[in-house]
Image (cartoon, coloured by chain):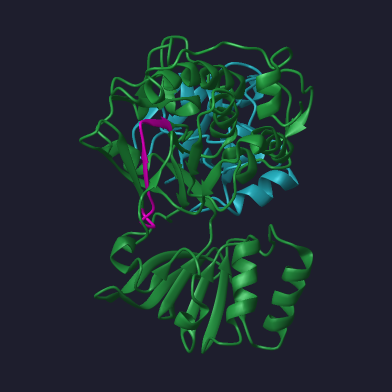
Amino acid sequence: MKIVATDRKGATREVEGRDGWSVMEILRDAGFDIAAECGGACACATCHVYVTEGWYEKLTPPSDAEIDMLDMALAVEPTSRLSCQITCGPDLDGIAVTVAPE
Amino acid sequence: MSSPIETDVAIIGAGPIGLFAVFELGLLDLKCHLIDILDRPGGQCTELYPEKPIYDIPGLPIVTGQELTDRLLEQAKPFNPTFHLSQMASALTKLDDGRWKLTTDMGTEIIAPVVVIAAGGGSFVPKRPPIAGIEAYEGKSVHYAVRKMEQFRGKNILIAGGGDSALDWTINLAPIAAKLTLVHHRDGFRAAQHSVNQMRELAAHGKVNFEVASVKALHGSDGQLSAVTLANPEKKEWEHACDTFIQFFGLTIKLGPIADFGLNLTENLVAVDTAKFESTTPGIFAIGDINTYAGKLKLILSGFHEAALMAQAAFHIVKPNEKLRFQYTTSSSSLQKKLGVA
């Protein structure tokens, strides 16, 4: 599966996702500037991304823990998600996300 | 300012690795002072995930960040470490006698032959929203904490955030503010229910205005705010007059002044050798998440190992004329005496 990711400077590139990995892990390993301070525990909100409309609706809705944690994210928008809580899989092939500002 | 503290080892960071370093150094009779920017020990464990279980600590099949911290504090207790909390290590200078002087932003000075950097990812600092030009207002009319409530008496305050800090300060500042508005991106909060109820009660009585919105822009001059632009999908954008903006989005980690200590850094990490975990600057060690070497894994258990080897090397710097006697806590009565169990 592919992830179409846009960094904070607006540059977009396609990265190869791995089924079962979180989008945060894929983006971090691909060199995107994602702090992911808590390492994917839904405990810090530093892997905040905007999911492109159309894709946002396809995701498993955020858990209460993620909704709570998004309160600690900056510049939250209606399509905000924590990328550590999005799991790669064939259903998300082509998902487009933008790394949120720090 | 009081006179400098002299000790054997100054440790930057009171997270799990800094705490375990106290234990390992203590077994070798080395005294420690720790500095941490947070107001309590534990670092990321207590700040980010106090209630989350950790499963990969040897011998502890499941332990939360808070429990691990409590146990490490208990383990280090016989060695009476001194904590300098809510302070940031801000400068490191070499003295003529070969020792190091570590200074904090509160003016604390610690002189020691060995400095151990166990700072994890760096310092926890407030998250700063990506609003253009916000720097110009910081400290004057834009704040990230409330130190003195009186400073806000009679102000037209805007508070942003949806956690306990945002709600607590909304409730506490409402009586002394001329006007107080709370903005949050949703009509829901990550906070104690009684605080949420209290805020809604204040809002119902017109003592607090609550807006579901985000702050998009700041307006004012010379650091003095006069209004902000708020936005939400229903009302789009509108101007909101206020002279004070306080925001609570929690903390994030920045390397901070360590970057200016003159150390050999690789992508914000301190390069160390794997025999002593010493930086390329003699006497300055780095252990835990802050260091880098071939094969480095950012695991708490790796930091424990690094602390043990660091302590052996630190001993030779602090006590150059003494022979290090390697002993086991199971069999050494002198170690057991230090631990208060013999």
Closer to the camera, B129 or B340? B340
Q: Is residue B278 magenta?
A: no
Q: How many marks?
A: 0
Closer to the camera, A71 or B111? B111
* Span of residues in magenta: B105-116
Vertically, is B60 above or below B183?
A: above
User: B60 left or right of B174?
Assistant: right
Q: Is residue B115 magenta?
A: yes
Which chain did the image draw in green? B
Residue A30 is at least partly visible in this image? no
Question: In the rendered view of the protein, which quadrant contains the N terminus of chain B?
Answer: bottom left
Closer to the camera, B89 or B30? B30
Residue furthest to the left: B96
Q: Position of residue A71 (x, y in %)?
A: 60, 54
Residue at position x 35%, y 56% in the image: B107
Closer to the camera, B104 or A41? B104
Q: Position of residue B18 (x, y in %)?
A: 53, 33
Question: In the rendered view of the protein, which quadrant contains the C terminus of chain B?
Answer: top right
User: B267 left or right of A83?
Assistant: left
Residue B36 is at least partly visible in this image? yes
Quadrant of the rendered image containing residue B204: bottom right
Vertically, is B143 above or below B63?
A: below
Q: Position of residue B271 (x, y in %)?
A: 35, 20
Vertically, is B15 above or below B198?
A: above
Q: Position of residue B68 (x, y in %)?
A: 70, 34
Residue at position x 26%, y 30% in the image: B98
Identify the colour of chain A in the image: cyan
Residue at position x 71%, y 23% in the image: B336
